[in-house]
Image: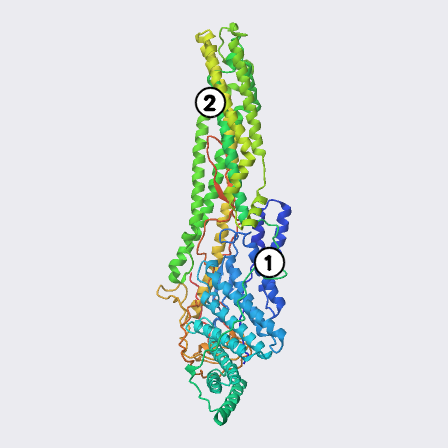
Amino acid sequence: MTNFISVQLKKASEVDLAKPLCKFIQQSYPGAEAQAEHCRAAEELSRLRKSALGRPLDKHESALETLLRYYDQLCSIEPKFPFSENQVCVTFTWKDAFDKGSLFGGSAKLALASLGYEKTCVLFNCGALASQIAAEQNLENDEGLKAAAKHYQFASGAFQHIKDTVLSALNREPTVDISPDTVGTLSLIMLAQAQEVFFLKATRDKMKDGIIAKLANQAADYYGDAYKQCQYKDTLPKEVFPVLAAKHCIMQANAEYHQSILAKQQKKFGEEIGRLQHAADLVKTVASRYDEYINVKDLVDKINRALAAAKKDNDFIYHDRVPDLKDLESIGKASLVKSTPVVVPLSQKFTDLFEKMVPLQVQQSVSVYNQRKADLVNRSIAQMREATNLANGVLASLNLPAAIEDVSGDTVPQSILNKSKSVIEQGGIQTVDQLIKDLPELLQRNKEILDESLRLLDEEEATDNDLRTKFKERWQRTPSNELYKPLRAEGANYHNILNKAMQADGQVKERYQTHRDTIALLCKPEAELNAAIPSANPAKTLQGNEVVNVLRTLLTSLDEVKKEREQLENDLKSVNFDMTSKFLTALAQDGAINEEAISVTELDRIYGSYTQKVQESLKKQEELLKNIQNAYQDFSKMKQSNNESNLREEVLKNLAVANDNFVELVANLKEGTKFYNELTEILLKFQNKCSDIIFARKTERDELLKDLQQSIAREPSAPSIPLPTYQTTPAAGNKPAASPTPTPAPRTMVGTKPQPPARPPPPVISAASSSSSALAPSGSAAAPAAAPAPTPGASAPAASTAPSQAQGPPYPTYPGYPGYCQMPMPMGYNPYMYGQYNLPYAPSPVYQTPGQPPYPPPQQPGYPFPQQPYYHQQ
């Protein structure tokens, strides 16, 4: 009678976790020591997966412990690695636990690049293995009973957790075994079996009959609910339904039997007989309909003996009226079980392999903080540089300080000589020419990388469209043009950046041509420079004048402001504060990070004094320039006015302006060169990102083509590829309609596959004989050919909607890079004004797929008919 239902494990395809995780670690963590440590942890995780999923597991606690440790590790890495199609792309492939395939091979499977999918399937195996361990326990002793109850309740909690989370963890329809309906039913079955274990323990401990009756009645209620949930659905193996119906009747019979003993103790002899009669009817139903699954001979004998004795005593002694069944009081219920909630860590021996790795949420917060910091620093530096350029422009327009130094009228002012020396030391006109010459080459290199990346996307998209046109409804995967929308948007953004850069290049070249001759003049030796400057009458009367002294003092003060500004700029750039600890503390305390509030507070604390100094510097310069302009008006009135003096002053002004333009042009061109070089690295990452997803799509395409050819080969008249447009695969599987009565399963070992027919013509293989028990009562034996009588109230389960062919990686969505560390574009390069762009990191290695077309699978051994020839479609 104590046959228990256990669940078959899902099977996973082999996956190398170490390679993609190490790749992400190398991109995200610059420190060599941290990289090495995290990569070792990634390799250990990959080995743990092989131990948990890559080999058959014993029905033992140690095997379950391995599964639990792997599940805990998956939960721990989830917030630290951005698993998705476009970031850490790992495709997990799992087979349906209840689908046994066909004679031609193949089974329903699903492949997703989702860590949530991997977690769901691993947790399913945890629950399944727990059910198998519980079914193996010796229920004749207390230790076995306790272990069985514990594992059934854990399995119930695992399946319930999957029911609550599976749809949110996946982005497409799950396989039948992990669908909410299926795991919800499994959870209830496990709970019912745990309640039955407590009933057995209460019976063994000879507890009060009233309590035992309530425990049995509650178990009957659980079994009944489980049967109702799955009797109209073709989600579980057929042999499960009669077991559930039989257990429902048996538990009810036990409840009535023990309640009859209580009635006898209370001298309610008529009630005793009524309950025993009901119990006898229930076990009679089980014996007649479900004897192939559960043997109730001992229970039948026990109830019949009690009923015969009760009737005899009542007939000869008590003569108590036997009430109708509907008049009997309902038996109470007592539940001693509940689903064990899934609380990580599940393993008692769990140690986080990536304990020292910063969670992805913290990485994102640090990245956004760095962006805010860069904005603040760059804004302050830009304000100071703009103010310095303004001051230089004002001084150049007034020919200062050359005007107050030019008292002889026939020598080069010292300020002009200093400017000339500075220009010559920086390479002069040759430096600018070389920088301008390099820009087109850098620009062309970036354009070629971007064009090549988009070409890869175009080629794969064209191939996908051709296959979609050829296979039509059979080509069941997300179209490439939808999947690549974020990538194409990113590529368009890079195109815009390059277009703006080209416009800025043109502005710089135009400006350079305007001032080239004057800059070239500054590069001349002093004698040639002096000869090029017109001479004028000396203005010796201005020597020692108060106005000249005031101007000199003001110019000296302005130079000090500029030097202080340079130092302030260096200070702003050198400030460094690691916010990781702040964000980790916030995450630990609140469970979330309010990045904006924390960042704004810390930036104000760290940079508040610097921004105040910047504003003070700007205000001081404004006052100095105002005083310089006023003093220069007085100075210009005192100067002797003649044409020679005006012409000389104009040339000196142009030389001062040329110096300022040279300094700014060199700075802009160097920033432009740096910009193009950094953009090259970003575009290479973008190219690698495109290559990675194209590699994944090609792998998926090859697998889908292989599955399609296998599916076509299994059809009655398999045409050669390409298929005609009218021949498509229906959405639902081609399973025969279920019988309205529960069909007994053959009592073979779990997982045994059916054998092909001995000789043609092959017989029609029924559902009962063509599939083996993936979820079956433990200890079942061979079943007869005839189906048992139907359960009262039962109806035929609906036909299966599980897909009949294997499914490749779906890639249903391609979200726009959540979780990526933002990388600011290089700043500066005025007047380029590229601004800042947040560009995501991308995977770096470039993969290439083998170009071999897939072929049909080899013929099944032992199949009596010759395989149809395969003609490769050219």
Front-lying residue, 720 or 108: 108
Which residue type carries mark 1? Ser
Which residue type carries mark 2? His
Front-lying residue, 562 or 474: 562
Crowding at dot 2, Cα within 10 Å, few <14 / some 14-19 / many 20+, comes out as: some
* Callouts 1 and 2 close, C-beta under 8 Å: no
Q: Would you name the residue on which mark 1 appears?
A: 46
Circle 2 — which element? helix
Q: Quadrant of the C terminus?
A: bottom left
Q: Residue at x 61, y 55 (%)?
A: 352
471 vs 279: above or below: above
Q: Quadrant of residue 75?
A: bottom right
Give percent across and percent down for residue 723. Answer: 39, 64
Circle 1 — which element? helix
**Which numbered disc covers residue 515?**
2
Residue most extreme to the left: 726
Crowding at dot 1, Cα within 10 Å, few <14 / some 14-19 / many 20+, comes out as: many
**Which numbered disc covers residue 12?**
none
Residue most extreme to the bottom: 316
661 vs 158: above or below: above
Front-lying residue, 358 or 529: 358
Q: Quadrant of the N terminus?
A: bottom right
Residue 673 can be seen, yes or no: no
Give percent across and percent down for residue 261. Answer: 53, 83
579 vs 759: above or below: above
Q: Quadrant of residue 337?
A: bottom right
Q: Mark 1 or 2 closer to N-term?
A: 1
